[in-house]
Image (cartoon, helix red, strand yellow):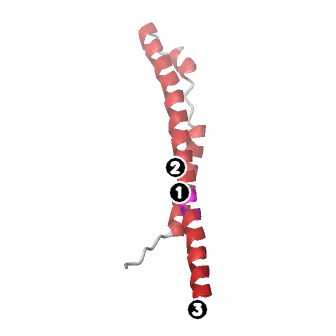
Amino acid sequence: MPDLQVDISELRNRSKSLRATAALLNDVKIDALDIASVVGHERLAGKVREFGNNWDTTRGRFRDHLEALAKTFDAIADTFEDLDGKLAEALRRKK
């Protein structure tokens, strides 16, 4: 049977990267109301406000998905670490 190799540190690194990206999204805010007030055209101002509202909603969802994916990577790493420990213990008992 072929060996299964999982790079747990790489899973952990990916999880950290996802969390860092999610944290950056917290800091990316557009003050659409301020921008809309200076564009000089009401229809354009309305589109700027609409974009700002949509951006906030979409950014929040994207951030939440990144956090969920990071948790999934951590869960996979935890599961493989646990499984590896149990298999090693079973082999020690078998000897």
86 or 60, which lies in front? 86
Disc 2 and disc 3: Cα gap in Å?
39 Å
Q: How many marks?
A: 3
What x and y, as percent, mark residue 4? 43, 74
What's the magenta region?
A: 73-78
Kind of residue sitting beneath label 2: Leu
43 or 60, which lies in front? 60
Q: In the image, what residue occupies the spot 52% across and 28% down?
A: 57
Residue 76 magenta-drawn?
yes
Kind of residue sitting beneath label 3: Lys
Q: Is residue 27 above or below residue 81?
A: above
Q: In the image, what residue occupies the spot 59% across and 63% down?
A: 78
Residue at the extreme bottom: 95
Mark 1 vs 3, N-terminal side: 1
76 or 34, which lies in front? 76
Q: Is residue 43 above or below residue 57?
A: above
Q: Is residue 59 above or below residue 74?
A: above
Mark 2 vs 3, N-terminal side: 2
Residue 46 magenta-drawn?
no
Disc 1 and disc 3: Cα gap in Å?
33 Å
Residue at the extreme top: 42
Q: Check disc 3: other Cα within 10 Å, few if <14, some if 14-19, many if 20+.
A: few
Disc 2 target residue: 69
Quarter of the N terminus within the rendering: bottom left
Name the chief secondary structure element in magenta: helix
Q: Check disc 1: other Cα within 10 Å, few if <14, some if 14-19, many if 20+.
A: many
1 and 2 marks in contact (CB < 8 Å): yes
| Disc number for residue 95 | 3
